[in-house]
Amino acid sequence: MASGEIRRGGESPADVIEVESASSGFGFRLFSGPLSAPLNKRGEKKGARFSFPTSAASPMFSPSPWRCVVLALLLPCFLAASSVPLLHNSDVKALKVGEEIRGETLTLRSAQRIYELLGLRRSVSYEVKISYPASVPANFSIQLQRSVPGLSQRKNRRLLNTEKLIFKADSDESVFVILTVEPEGVVAMANVPERELVIYNIVCDELMMGIPHGAWWVGVAALLCLVLGGMSSRAFRCWELGFLLLYAAAFYLIVIDRSVHLSNNYRGKLSGLRPGWIPGHLNDISDAQWRNFRGNLPILTIVLGCFTIVANVLRYWYNLKGRGMSFIWILTSLSYLSYLHGACVGYILLIGSLNFLMAKIFARSKYYLGILWVFNLSILILNRIFEGYSFSLFGQQFAFLDNFRGTFRWHICFNLVLLRIISFGCDYHWSHTNSLFDQKKHMQRCNICSSGKACYLSLQERSVHGDKYSFNMYLCYLIYAPLYIAGPIVSFNAFATQMDMPQKNYSLGQITWYGFRWILTLFLMEAMTHHIYYNAFAVSGTWRQLSPLEILIIGYGVVNFMWFKFFLIWRYFRFWSLMSGIEAPENMPRCINNCYDLETFWKSWHASFNKWLVRYMYIPLGGSHKKLLNVWIIFTFVAVWHDLEWKLLSWAWLTCIFFAPEILIKSSITSVQVRSAFGVCIQRELTAIAGAVTISCLMIANLAGFVIGPSGIKWLISRLLHKDGLPILAGMLTTFYVGTKLMFHIRDAKQNHQLKDH
């Protein structure tokens, strides 16, 4: 073939027809195809991509010198122009991160399309991937383009019939992908028209450790298959524990990394962030409870420290018992309440006195408990409706008292006072009946009581002497300073007994260690709120700009933030109560990430409230005999007790909906006794699956109640059940399944440790 010939890869010289100028020696290919292909009526080859007349006598290819010169000058321009993308013929389409566009089509003759990438986050790696049928004779190329430099880019990777481009977004500028397709190969079949269009799919995925999110489950499944093969039961448990720990570590690293990236990227759009004490970081104090507690922590420590020292010195100096100590704590607590509520202390004293009078008059009546509940629920609702009652409602002569309402709304704290009022009324009413508590049987099962001490349960269940139900002990119980603001909640029987005889279950050294651990937890909370702004996302409404995966991460973080917040608040006041000689139940006895069913969760979240609900609501309503009905009544009360909001009611009713199947499944499992090793294994796996579903439901309920509300939940569920959201849903359930299995190992380790101790 003459010099200057253009030939496709894979073509033989016999497949090329040349036109050559005799005078200049210039030649070029006219078409590609077999020479033996038949001619049509005009003398053109069939089955060729480009068909031109092949007669040397054609006027266009006359051998005159000036035509050859012109052709020689125009050909380089034509070739250069053909290599330039035809931008005016291409259309720009949007390609969102994580959403695949399927069934795209382009013509097979040097066509081009531009995609704008949406949803990119700074400092995150991405992969743009094109897939198409293997039978398509096409060559795809991907280019990245942006107006501002600074985008680090790796070279294209070609894997069979897939074209990939990996890059890292280093700024917030718009990024475009230019996709070009060209024909490739030779004609395979003569007399068959060639393909006009090429079909392909395109997707932009976020990479995690170089692997797309949707491909992680493949590696996890492969690793599980390797672990499961041919092991003994004990060896399998050890390998399983190692895998679970590795998975948990990877999960938390990923969650923390994504959370930090989200917090940094949305920092300017979040409300409630203030300059913190860690240099270069803002502090998330968007939660009102945490902000007030943290801001008043120094003065609270001074006040409660002074109260505790004075009370303990007077107790041991004058050998005071219940009656004397109640007077001391009434005086100190009233001064404390006067600072908090000002003139509104009168409301608390008035409502408390009315309840005490009602108890003394009607306590022996069988209708008393109904009267007690109706009266106090009415007070609770009225407090919310009238926002603590303005003094001007009772006459203009009292309007000046509205200027002395203190620094803290009294009707917020009254929620806990109401629980104490009901506790006193019920304990006093039951003191006139025979107790069903078997003290001897309890001592045989309780390690604390068998050692000569008294556990909280025995203090709660044993009725005190009649003289303990006095007004001064009752008033001291209602306004006891260390537990007044946040609890934990103590029954009247337990409080009155310990006011007479201080607790002995905790030594001074144990209480000191308890306080030191609290300080370490406070520093951990500060580190989290300075680097990750979970609650700010919840209160700012910025979750609407996030993907479903990011909403789930934020929701999980909000639940953990709430756990940390209440853990610190409740343990702080419990510490001061222990220093004063009153043992209150631990409100957070178990980590939130170590609960795989709703019953365990509610026994471990605000545990003192749970004990109160069981004693004063659940058992009187019928206990386990009416469990399915009781949960609806109890959780509705819990929602109203917190606040009058539809969001909280939806949270309560969602929890009940999720609670009902768990109750039925547990009752079915306990009725079936499994003895074989295979049966135990199947039961364990089914329980782990049920635990994963339960944790997911619990997250949805908390998202509805405290983050995105009921309308947001509807949107989130629709996204998760969409084709693109199903991998996220599967990954969430898999993660919670792994977490549940890890909780099983923790439970087994604790049981083995207890058996060794015995």
Image (spheres, grey):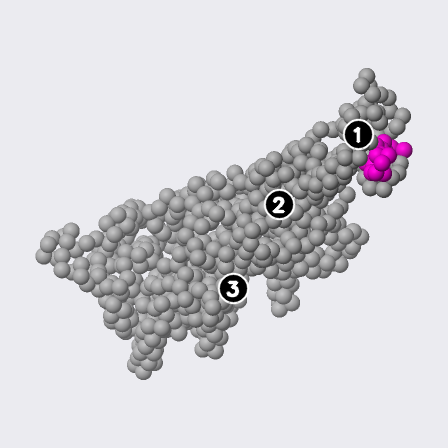
Amino acid type for the residue under numbered disc 1:
Phe
Mark 3 nearby-residue class (10 Å; few <14, some 14–19, many ≥20)? some
Is residue 318 at least partly visible in the picture?
yes
Horizontal side of 680 relative to 450 (left or right) equals right
Residue at image location 66% in from the left, 51% down from the top: 166
The magenta-colored residue range is 14-28
Tell me the distance, in whole angstroms, between the alpha carbons under discs 1 and 2.
41 Å
Above-or-below relation of 71 to 680: above
Above-or-below relation of 16 to 479: above
- Mark closest to the chain's N terminus, 3 or 1: 1
Q: Disc 1 designates what residue? A: 61
Question: Label for residue 446?
Answer: 3
- Mark closest to the chain's N terminus, 1 or 2: 1
Question: Which secondary structure lies at badge 3?
Answer: loop
The quadrant in which the C terminus is found is bottom right
Q: Marks 2 and 3: which is nearer the front? A: 2
User: Picture quarter containing residue 78?
Assistant: top right
Question: Label for residue 177?
Answer: 2
Counting from the top left corner in percent of width and height, residue 241 is at 68, 59
For the residue pair 290 and 123, the one nearer the viewer reads as 123
Counting from the top left corner in percent of width and height, residue 674 is at 67, 47
- Mark closest to the chain's N terminus, 2 or 3: 2
Amino acid type for the residue under numbered disc 2:
Val
Is residue 371 at least partly visible in the picture?
no
Tell me the distance, in whole angstroms, between the alpha carbons under discs 3 and 1.
109 Å
Q: Marks 3 and 1: which is nearer the front? A: 1
**Contact (Cβ within 8 Å) of mark 1 with mark 2:** no
Residue at image location 33% in from the left, 64% down from the top: 484
